[in-house]
Amino acid sequence: MNNDEVISLLREKGINVFGSLDSYIEWTETPILELEWKRPKDMLETYDGIKSIMDILKKIESSIG
């Protein structure tokens, strides 16, 4: 799976969690405490960053589901 496919999966997960693409994009532009106040969109360059974002999305999903 290449990086574009992984980012696409993250986007789909984010849309499912936040309800819309706009809400997901807004979230990716917001500094997150769990990411040491980094923005999720700045973490898409590395495997660890992508995994951290997916883990956070799963936590959010389980807390609102």
Image (tube, rainbow, N blue to C red):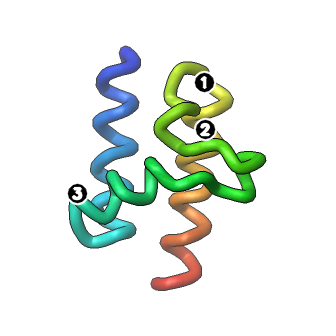
Q: Which sits earlier in the primary sequence, circle 3 or circle 2?
A: 3
Tell which of 46 and 2 is nearer to you: 46
- At horizontal 51% and vertical 55% (from top left) the residue drawn is 30
Q: Which sits earlier in the primary sequence, circle 1 or circle 3?
A: 3
What residue sits right under mark 2 in the picture?
Answer: 51
The disc label shown at residue 21, or none? 3
Q: Quadrant of residue 38?
A: top right
What residue sits right under mark 1 in the picture?
Answer: 47
Task: Please indicate whether residue 54 sits to the left or right of residue 38 in the image.
Answer: left
Tell which of 43 and 13 is nearer to you: 43
- Tell me the SS state at disc 3: helix
- Amino acid type for the residue under numbered disc 2: Lys
Q: Residues within 10 Å of mark 3 (few under 14, many from 20)?
A: some
- At horizontal 28% and vertical 50% (from top left) the residue drawn is 12
Residue mark closest to the camera, 3 vs 2: 3
Tell which of 20 and 59 is nearer to you: 20
Kindly report the distance in space between the C-alpha atoms of the residues bearing marks 3 and 2.
20 Å
Furthest residue to the top? Answer: 2
